[in-house]
Image (cartoon, rainbow, N blue to C red):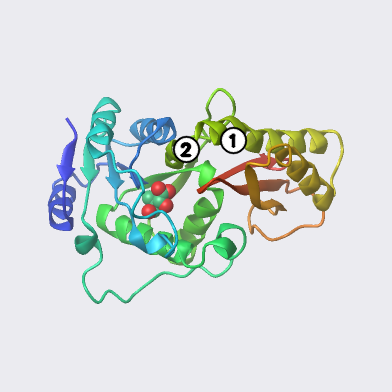
Amino acid sequence: MTLILRDKAALRTWRAGLGANTRVGFVPTMGALHDGHISLMAQAREAADVVIASIFVNPLQFGPNEDLSRYPRPIEADIAKLEVAGVDALFLPSVDDMYPPGASTFVDEEMVSLPLCGAERPGHFRGVATVVLKLFNLVQAQVAFFGQKDAQQCAVIERMVRDLDVPVEIRRGAIVREADGLALSSRNVYLSPEDRAAAPLIHQSLRAVEAAFEGGERDAAKLEQIGRNVLAQSDRIRVQYWDVRDPESLGAIASVGARGALLAVAAHLGTTRLIDNLLIGGRG
Ligand code: PAF
């Protein structure tokens, strides 16, 4: 039975009741749970004595023209999935509880958050870092899980935890994909049938670049062009970025060296923005 904690006070009481030696695993989410989230819950189950998830559609990380109001909120279905996944507790706070009137303190990471999605979505990572630090302070987990699909988010959170000495271990869960390669995302439900049919090209573009890298190509601009050429097969896909980046700093690189690279893509299909990535060489 998943215990539902609807505000910070309930969470604090629950947390205080756990034994000092209890290892807590935490999976923060915005709900609309899919198998990618569930795989993170399973990893938390393996790594911890007690697993807590959060569902909070964080207004601070949405821009004025983004999809905050239409973001899917199937809360009953989500709770049922958490029950099946054996999650012990769900933190389900309101916006007012998380952000009391006049809240004026934010977390700004100023390097890995700047390129890629940071450049396209000003303020997004400030919103992510702020809410994740608040959640870490409230939940006080020893280990927390984030999906590799949001590779830049993982990098920002890892950097924040390091720089601000937050006592939590961050683990990344592998991207979970549909059979045709489309990375699972809560936003996939927005895709029209035509856009859904075109969407696997995103993963195919990553794999094409991986194949070119394995064939010996190291030039970042040439690799990026190979990726863009694959996406050009569909006029439904509008590329926002298709970049070969340093896997740690996310800075631009001229060629792929011993550290390998993060291949990162963001594209619009209709009004839906999808992201995906692949590590090559090095850690990949
Ligand atoms: O990845 C998400 O779902 C969100 O960005 C997160 C980490 C829960 C913060 O709101």
Q: Position of residue 204 (x, y in %)?
A: 68, 33
In percent of width and height, residue 66 lies at 44, 58
Q: Quadrant of residue 75?
A: top left
Q: Nearer the viewer, residue 92 or 275?
A: 275
Residue under label 2: 188
**Would you say 180 lies left or right of 21 here?**
right
Residue type (three-letter) at the residue carrying disc 1: Ala
Looking at the rendered structure, the secondary structure element under dot 2 is: helix
Residue 163 pos. (x, y %) = 48, 66
Q: Is residue 84 above or below residue 115?
A: above
Given residues 232 and 31, the one toward you in this image is 232
Residue 252 percent location from the top left of the image: 72, 60
**Label 1: element kind:** loop
Q: As displayed, is residue 96 above or below residue 203?
A: below
Q: Is mark 2 within 8 Å of ligand 1?
A: no
Residues tagged 1 and 2 counted as in contact (Cβ below 8 A): yes
Q: Is residue 148 above or below residue 245?
A: above
Image check: 225 left or right of 76?
Answer: right
* Circle 2 residues within 10 Å: few <14, some 14–19, many ≥20: some
Q: Residue at x 64, y 59 (%)?
A: 249
- The residue lying at 37 percent from left, 30 percent from top is 42
The structure residue drawn at horizontal position 25% and vertical position 41%, both measured from the top left corner, is 22
Residue under numbered circle 1: 199
